[in-house]
Image (cartoon, coloured by chain):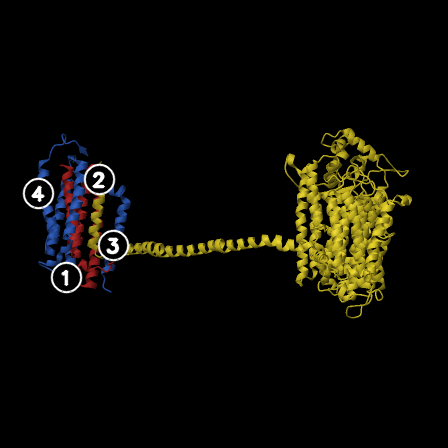
Chain colours: A red, B yellow, C blue
Amino acid sequence: MLLNQFLLLSAILFAIGVYGVIVRRNGVLVLMSIELILNSVNINFVVFGTMHGLGGQVFALFVIAVAAAEVGVGLAIVLMIYRTKRTIDIDQLDELKG
Amino acid sequence: MWFLTHAWLIPALPALSFVLILLFGKRFLGPTRAHWIGIPFVLLAFALSLVTAGAWLSRAGDHPPDERAALSGVDARCSAVGAAAAAGPEEFEAAIAPSTGESAAGAAEGKESAAGKEKADGKEKEEVPSQPVVRCLNWFSSGQGDQYRSFTIGTLVDGQSVMMLVIVTLISLLVHIYSSDYVNGDRRYTHYYAFLSLFTSSMLFFVLAESTIQMIVGWELVGVCSFALIGHWWEEKPNSDAALKAFITNRVGDIGLLVGVIILFFGAGQTFSIMDLNIAANSGQIDHTLLLVGSCCLLAAVASKSGQFVLHTWLPDAMAGPTPVSALIHAATMVVAGIYMVGRLYPVFWEGLSIGGSSINLMAVIGACTALFGALLAFVQKDIKKVLAYSTVSQLGFMVTALGVGAWTAAMFHLLTHAFFKACLFLGAGSLSHACHHSFDMVEDMGGLRKVMPRTFWTYVVGTLALAGIFPLSGFWSKDEILAGTGGLNDANGAYTFALIMLLAAAFCTAAYMTRTIWYVFYGEYRGHGDPHESGPRITVPLIILATLGAVAGVANLPKFAGDASLWLEHAIEPIGVMFPGKATGFTHAAFNPLLAVISVAAALAGGGITWLFYAKGQFAWMQGLSERNRMARAGKTLLEKKYYLDILYTDIIVGSIKKPIAAGVYWFNQKIIDGAVNGVGSSAVAAGEYVYTKVDQRIVDGTVDGIGSVANSTGSGLRKIQTGRIQQYAALFFAAAALLAGVIVVVIGS
Amino acid sequence: MLIASTEVPINVAANIAFGIVALGMIAAAIRVVTTKNIVHAALYLVLVLAGVGVNFLLLQAEFLAITQFLVYIGAIVVLFLFGIMLTRAPLGVSEDLDNPKMKGIGLLTALMVLAVTSYSVLATFGADRISLPGGASTNTADLSDEIFSKYLIPFEVISVLLLAALIGAIVLARRD
């Protein structure tokens, strides 16, 4: 199997995730797009792990753990936003406007 | 000998007195007692002078073996010849050898005869070289290597300076005592005594001068003191005018002094030392033309300081000062500074003007003219001090004539006797004015005073007889020696017949105008106000002392017939040796001529007698009012009254013609050019300021500053739009930038 | 290990499997970011995650694949669904899930990122092949050896991180 097929797949997923982060208005959907990005990176890690030993897979494991933690905290934050503003429309979080 | 080497103490004492009076006089002694400092110091200086004179006389009794030993008293630092004398005989010979073709044999011959025996009138008196004592300090030095010159300041003590020391300190002492009564209660009593001390010190400094530079310093100092003392009552304008006239007229002559000294400096091989100058001039080392020019320049200085004709105009005006000042400065001491200088530098004049063996020279002409014309001017004066001033001018003319005909000792002798009787006459005039309410006008305010002021009268008469030259008073001996020295009637250094005739005429006039004065003052009816009385002892005792000296001083230099006592002054003070004209140059002394003595006394008696007959006995009545009736007589009188129009010439014509155009030109320059420049600078500065403000500051500088501000402002408000506060926008920017950067790196690294 | 293309035999079955899974993943991912139904987005996300797990299997990372299925699909997606529920997200079709203004920028940025990454990948690796060791898999055992020897400290740190995240989430979300 070509190296590039995995890497290209990962690149495409990454780009789609970036699109989602920028375009999606709902906070939860933004988090989902971030999950897309993280997974594309995971594929990369594992693919390169076949070349350089098991370090890639270990790291991918750690990424999964971190992603889990991040989603947990992220959703907690989204809940807080919902509690204060009654909406999780990110566009309305512009109090740092210059 | 100690006193001879430490003669500098004598001027130092009055100088110290000057400083003390200025600093402490008024504060500690009060405004009326400055004489408590002045008199003791000058008394001490007089005592020191007498002791120094005694030391000199004992030294004059020594017999040095030759010329070189005679110069052993000359410090080697002060004089090149002194150094040569100390080094050895060959160096000494080389130093005094003439630089022209004159052979050494001629010089040796001169030396031998100078050290040889003089045979005259059967008496053999060995001519002993005199031994001057010269000490000095290094004042300043300049130049490098070859050009190194060291200029000294010090004392030259020989007979001439010793005589002057005694005269100056004695007259100064008597004047100090006299002033304590005369100037009593004056508004500037302390200042007066301070300047009297300074003057005494300056004159003594001048007299002891060892170099011509020092002589100039002393000359100027006495001029300054004269200025200060003449203008003592400067609140009245005529007094300050007189002081200025004196100073400025002296200044004219000082140019001559300076130029003359410089000429002699270069002529004598770049030395200011008087010993070296004299020796160089005497031995023919200096070019004759240089000596002639130098003498003429120095004569200009003598003319101004010693009141010779054409530059004498300041002396009568100087009578504006207090009478003791006139006695001290303008009779006895300062005005004889010129005489002293000529006597000091006599070889220069002897060689330069070729005094020996001729019948006319510049100095004799000036002196004779002064003697006669000064005497004529005294006839038309109403002010007694002016009479005495013109008499001084005339007598100074006598002294200058004496020097001009080669009668050196006669001039010095006359200086001595004149100091006594003229000071006596001046102080007597002061005593008279004291009695007549400070008026000196003898025609208006005096008369018949012989009954109420006997001491003043008798001392005045003695002074007059001495001045007129009546036997046996001192004036007779000194004046007769001058007349004999002219060589008009007997052998002398030349055959100056014209001088003899003019001096005899002057003697006639002298007796005449002095008799006129005595008539106006002491005889007739008292024409003034108030009640005159005799003056106190502080005034009359100096008068008596001076009158006595004036009477008996003739014994100082009696002619040959007096045996061992004769020519005492000559032996005491006349220098003999390489620094003075001697037998080698033809210098001789005239013998006493009895016929001439009789003629001179007759002339004086005639003058006095005719005047007495005219005024007292009314004879020669046709002379009364002659100037009103006769045009020539009136012209003559007007000429005399206008003082030969010399004052008009000086003040109006010479000064006016120079002053007016220069003043106008300078004024124009100042207004147009200097003020114009200043104004121009000012207005251009203003215009420049305006321009800079409007164009540069307001437009450019402020514009730049404002522009930068507005640029920052617009940039800021533009960039502000990025800060939306929305995360997704930030995320978009972040990713885009990262992608871009990564792309750049990939491309760069890839290539 | 990279071996020149001539030496490794081509595993046709793996390639075909990969191809099908890849296409499915890409389609699902695009649907995640474009669908108007938020619950559908979550379900599409499940598909993508599953596809990633299958890829892991294809790369002989069995433990990782199982972990992926368990953690991601089993826990994280459930969390998402809980989040959707608790925030009263609009169920059903909803028009305002996208920010229309950002669509252009988003597309542009995504394309830029894609361009850069794909170019660099292609330029670097060209036609290189992966070689996978055959035989029985000892993946789990080897992995555990690695973790607990070489990567022990990061493992412990991750534990602390998870603890912190746990506490943090509780603190954030509690009602005071």
Q: Which of the numbered marks, if any, corresponds to residue B746?
A: 2
**In the picture, which quadrant includes the C terminus of chain B?**
top left
- Badge 1: residue crowd in 10 Å (few <14, some 14–19, many ≥20): few
Q: Residue at x 85, y 49 (%)?
A: B599
- Residue B329 in sight from this viewpoint: no
How far apart, in angstroms, are the residues tagged by discs 4 and 2? Answer: 31 Å
Circle 4 is placed at which residue position? Answer: C20
What amino acid type should be assigned to the residue bearing mark 4?
A: Ile
N-terminal-most mark, 4 or 1? 4
B305 with respect to A68 (left or right):
right
Are dots 2 and 1 in contact, CB under 8 Å? Answer: no
Judged from the image, the secondary structure of the residue bearing numbered disc 1 is loop
From the viewer's side, name the closer residue of B199 and B555. Answer: B555
- Badge 4: residue crowd in 10 Å (few <14, some 14–19, many ≥20): few
- Residue C148 in sight from this viewpoint: yes
Closer to the camera: disc 3 or disc 4?
Answer: 3
Classify B422 as above or below B76. below
**In the picture, which quadrant includes the N terminus of chain B?**
top right
Circle 1 is placed at which residue position? Answer: C88
Closer to the camera: disc 3 or disc 1?
Answer: 3
Q: Residue at x 26, y 50 (%)?
A: C159
Circle 3 is placed at which residue position? Answer: B719
B331 with respect to B118 (left or right):
left
